Structures are given as C-alpha cells and as structure tokens.
Amino acid sequence: MFLILTYSLFRRPASAALRRSPIELHIQVRRPVYIKSESPIKKAMAAGESGMNKSLSGGITLGLALILPTSVAAMTQAPAGPQVQLFVAGNDSKADKKGKEDKKEDKKEGGAANDRARDSKDSSAILEEIRQMRLLIERLEARVNQLETEKSAAIVKPTTPATETPGAAAPSASPDPKQTGALPDGDRKALDFFRDTTISGTVDGYYGYNFNRPVGRVNLLRAYDVSSNSFSLNQAAVSIERAPNVGAGRRFGARLDLMFGPATETVQGNAASELRPQTFRPIWQAYGTYVAPVGNGLTMDFGKFASSLGYEGNYTKDQINYSRSYLFNFLPYYHLGFRSNYAFNDRFNVTHYLVNGIGQSEDFNGFKSQAILLNIKPTKRVSWNINYYTGIEARDSIPALNPGFAPLPTQPGLTTDIVNPAPRGRTHIIDTYASWNATDKLTLVGQFDYVISRAQTFSAPSRVTGGAAYARYQFTPKFALAGRGEYLSDSGGLFSGVTQALKETTLTFDYKLVEGVLMRGEWRRDFSDRPFFLTNSPGVLKKDQNTATLGLVWWFGKEGGW
C-alpha cells in the first residue's frame, strides 16, 4: 500500500507525460519549493529487483512527509500549468505499476520533502502570528483614540457621555470640536484678549477725627481725607488695561480708569480743574498707546493720563501714607494730550508732554503746555526724577457751570464769555524726587519743588517752594511703619489762598490683613505760621489741626503700582 501511495504522489498526469520541467509551488514566505515529478516507473526499472524493499521505506517516508502539507500548498498556490494530484489508492489498486527507486535517490528525495514540510508548517505559523498581531494592533489603536477623545471631551463636559463600542473604528484625524473640547476660533480669540488684559479694582474708605472739631466737620488742605467724625468712602475705581506687547507682535494698547466717590471732587470733578467738570467726573484715565519701531521703541500715548509730577499718586495702596501731602494737592493731578517716552537703556529714559495744561481735559486757553521728564536709575535701588513743566494756565473764558439748555446750537456748558485782556503769564514748575531702597525693608524718599506763576507777563509772580521727606520700614510681611515730614512756603497764596508757611508731620502704620486688604492707622499734625485752620467756633482759627484716621483699602488685579 505504501508503494502505491508513493507512486500516486509522484505520478505525472497523462496530459503532462512528455513534460519533465519541475512543478513550482508558491507559499507566502516567498520561498519556492520544488517537487520533481520524474517517472517512477523508469526509476523502478533501473533500480531492479534488489531495490524494491529499500524503496519501500523511502516511499513511506516521502509519502508521510508530503501527503498533507504538499497537497494543501499545491492545491492552493500551484500555477495553472502542471499540477500535483494527491490520492490514496486501495490495496486492490494497480500494484504492478508501482515504481522502484534506488536507495540513494530515496533518501535524497525524502530529506528534501521533510525540509519542505517543515518550511510550510513554519510559514503557516508565522503567517498566523502576523495576522493575530495585526488584529491586536488595530484593536489597541482604536482603544487609544477612543480614550483620547473621552479625555478631551471631559474638559468641556460633553452633553452625552462617551461610550465604547466593541470593534468600533478609530476616530478621524479631525474630530468634532464639541467632542474634543477644542474651542472655536471666536472663543479662543476672546480668551487670548483677556489673557493679555488686566482688570483691576479698588475700594478706599476711612474714618477720620479732627481734634479741632471744626465747623462743618471739614479738614483743610487735605486732598482726599476731607471729612471729620464721619465714615467716608474716599473712592471706588475700576481699571482696564491692555498694554502693548512688542515681543508678541502687538504694538498698541489702551487703558481706562473709572473713578467714583468724593475723591472726584478734588480732581476731575473740580471746577478749578475743568470747564465742564460734570462731563469728565468719572474718567480718571483714558488713553491709547502705540510703540513706534524707532530705536528701542518710542512709546506714544494719547488721551487723559495721571501726571508724573510729584512722588505721590492717586491710588492709596501704592502710597507710603494714607493722607496725601501738600505737594500732591498742589501739583498737577493729570493731563490730556500726547505723552511720548523713550528708554535709551535700563538706567535712563526721557518723557515729553504736549498737553492742554494742568488738570485740563478741555483747554482753558488756546496755548498748549509742555513738559520734559528725565528718569535716572544709577543703581537698581535708586531712582531719580527731574521734571520741568511750563505753560499758560489761566482761563481766557468764563465757565458755564451746571449748565441747562445750550444757548447756542452746540453742547451744553460751552461758553463764549471771554476774559479781556486774555492772560498771557506763564507757569513754570521744577520738580524733582528720588527714592532709595536702602535695604529690602527700608525705603527713603526725598522731594523738592519750585513753582512760579504770573497772570500776565508783567504781573508780580506768586511762588511755591516746598519739600518732603519720607521713610518706611517693613518690619514683617504684614506690618510696616512710615513717616513723612513736609514744608511748603506759599508766597502769594498760590496754593492756600494766603501767604503762609505750612508744615505737616505724619506717622502711618500699615497692617496687611490678607493680600489685597490693607488697614492704615495715621496720626497727622498740620501747622502754620499764622491762624488758618478751622475750629468749632465760626470765625475762630487756629495755627494747627491734629487728625487721627483709620483707612481701609481693598484691591485686586494688577500687581505692583497702578
């Protein structure tokens, strides 16, 4: 039977009896396997009778090795030409036609068949492993993409929870923004705008007591703490600032400070400062900025901005004391016009003003005022300002305060009542101050001012000469102690209305409750060389006034000075 099986494996079909080319089988490992199907009858005749028994064992070996793998490969991948036919014959098949092969050829053919069988089995195993690995990779990729989608969607809390569908395809490369949490372009631009925009706010209130118990509970020569024996709201302010960022390619910016409360009566709500104070009362600052590509960058502002004349400023949280000095109350609070600044380096910069005048949102006359301000920083701990201002500051028209209906076809409050002769006298201000951070806890400041003013070019001048010294020591991160001493000579009553020499001393202690909440207690003594300050008796004046004040300041937003 085994001989018959061997013959069946290697018998050439009748249609290909005359063709002796080998049959080539292709498998997926791309390694050809050759099976030579030469005629077994011829080999049997050449081998003779003695080789029949030995060819039997060789045929058995060859048949067992090729019966399964070779038949499968041949049936699935053999070319359209010669074919290998596999069949099993019964014991009663044609035994007289079995082939005979010699022993040497049998062993050679048997070994080659075994090699081909092993290659076929190995190839099938490798192909199966590759297929399983491909399926596993596809499932893992689908799962990773699904997890990434669920994580992105969790940021914006999607309306429908993500669900996992077995065998689902991986999400596309451009998922829906609603599913991934990606922001639309409009929302992203809005977030970028507010990322570079600072919104700040402050509330400043106090309780003060004047030991003179003045009539009307009025403190004289004070800028903001004007009320005695009263809980008072000094000011509430909101600031919105988008500063230029040249590094990010944005050369423009803007700032708006809105201010409310009694403090506005001192500054832009004061008829001494404005022709139409009701129009500009809530606007403390409003200006736009552009950084021109000149040298290191020329910064130009247009609008209304706080003055840099004098050491002190508007916002209480940035000051050494709670009350303001005489010099703050006398020097310009703000200007409207052009401001240009150029920083040559970290130690020296120059600023130029071209403005309507001192505290004039609308010009008092047809002349424009100018100022040059120099800032010098010889070291990181020292800053020195030298400022010069000049302009014609007197009015050439009579204001129409609290206007009703406009007498002319224009806005209410504009006047055509002219002062004749128009004033032509100039005001000159020389202002300088320096601050020195002697240590990380001790700050020292000195200021000096000289002001001369004439109503007409031929008029006798009025002068103010003054100076102030400050010291502040930060004992702990929460507690600090500060003092101020000041002298002002008012010749001609340019500041106080009468000629006198004024002095004041102030002692202030700070206690920061938390970041953004500051409590200030203050004792201040004002005195003059002549009776000037109010008492509890009408018409009776004193040379001094003593006040005790407790101030509370809240703020948020921009870090550092405003």
Image (spheres, grey):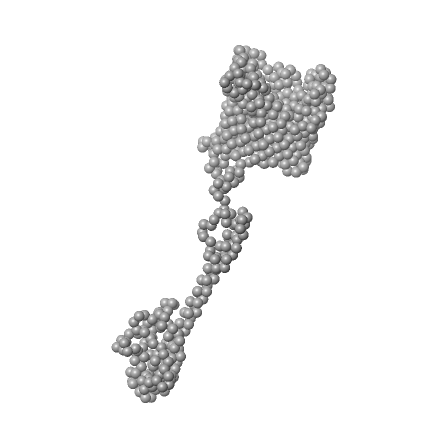
Q: Quadrant of the C terminus?
A: top right
Asked which quadrant contains residue 56, the reply is: bottom left
Residue closest to the eye, 289 or 125: 125
Does 376 appear above or below 65? above
Q: Nearer the viewer, residue 461 or 228?
A: 228
Is residue 305 placed above or below 77 in the rendered structure?
above
Visible residue check, residue 528: yes
What residue lies at 56% left-to-right and 24% top-to-bottom? Answer: 280
On the image, the x and y values in percent for residue 78 come to: 34, 71
Q: Is residue 36 left or right of residue 385?
A: left
Q: Quadrant of the N terminus?
A: bottom left
Residue at 71% x, 24% y is: 210
Vertical position of residue 542 compared to residue 558: above or below: above
Q: Position of residue 130 (x, y in %)?
A: 44, 65
Q: Quadrant of residue 285?
A: top right
Residue 205 x, y percent position in the rendering: 66, 30
Q: Position of residue 86 (x, y in %)?
A: 36, 77
Does the image show residue 448? no
